[in-house]
Image: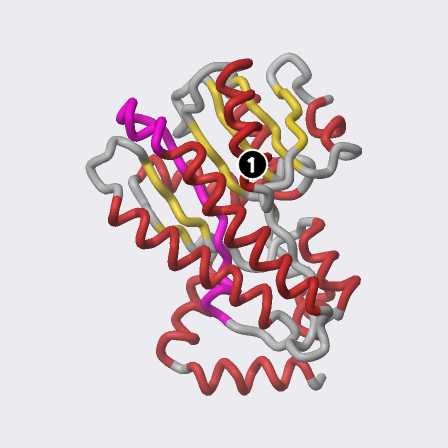
Amino acid sequence: MAFRGKVALVTGAASGMGQVSAWTVAEAGATVACLDRDEAKLPTTIAKYPDRLHPYVCDVANVDGVNEAVAAIERDLGPIDRVTHAAGIMPAGHVVDQPLEDVIRLMRVNYEGTVYVVRATLPQMKQRRSGDLIMFGSLAGHVLLTHLGAYSASKSAVNTLAEVMIHENRGSGVRIMLVCPPMTKTPLIQQAVNTSNPRTIQIGIEQNRMADPNVIVEEIEKGIERGEEILYPLAEAKVLLRLRRFFPGLLWTIMHKAENS
């Protein structure tokens, strides 16, 4: 695999993309700090490789908590050679109907959490002139859907932040990648289903079009080894991105038709 370091930090490690990412680097022999706010679910992740996976309870939306967790990881396990920032939330709803606290927390967790994790870890990797920083944006930050306005806004912010950071840190020795996956079969999708259940997501589930998180992680490893900086894994993501860029009206027509089906 592409990772050649000793210590990795994975946020959102209790489930979904974070869990798969943690298992992948642990299987390759790395020591992995598994960070998540869900203390009850972390043991499920840790149980697969208990000698290599180490739990750290932290809400990435809390800057002091992130700084303290990173300091503890470096003290307990050593310098962090890879950061995979997969923590995120996805409650759905129409912008004016969605609970205001959900809209605010989406930005705090998805965008501010990214800022906090990056600022707590990237400077040390730059100082050593080595390391990997993998950030999960989303295709939804480019390809917009009704019911996901607040989520897409938070991921658009992450996509923008990460792309700028890639260019600001070229030549630093740190490999930085922004990953923008399509709809993926993780508990994140269930949050949207439980809160608003957009028809577009229902169709994705019914047609078995949800991406496999294991495949996404495999694509990340291949991509970072090739030196890719922005990854749109799988063909569907690339098709939707091109539709959004060149035929936005057509894409909205397709989305409205799906929503009303």
| Quadrant of residue 48 within the rendered picture | top right
Q: Secondary structure at mark 1?
A: helix
| Residue type at the position of mark 1 | Asp
Chain part drawn in magenta: 123-143
Asked where in the image residue 159 lies, by quadrant, the reply is: bottom left
Query: Where is the C terminus found, in terms of image quarters?
Result: bottom right
Q: Which residue is mark 1?
A: 64
Q: Is residue 165 left or right of residue 120?
A: left
**Vertically, is 167 above or below 151?**
above
Residue at 65% in and 43% down: 16
Instruction: Identify which residue, 188 or 181, lies in the foreground.
Output: 188
Residue at 49% x, 37% y is 84
**Residue positioned 49% across, 48% down in the render:** 136
Left or right, residue 224 beside residue 257 = left
Name the residue at 67% across, 81% down.
259
Q: Position of residue 186 (x, y in %)?
A: 67, 49
Q: In the image, is 103 to the left or to the right of 119?
A: right
Which quadrant would residue 39 be assigned to in this image? Answer: top right
**Closest to the observer: 81 or 206?**
81
Give the residue at the far front of this rendering.
64
Whether residue 245 is in magenta: the answer is: no
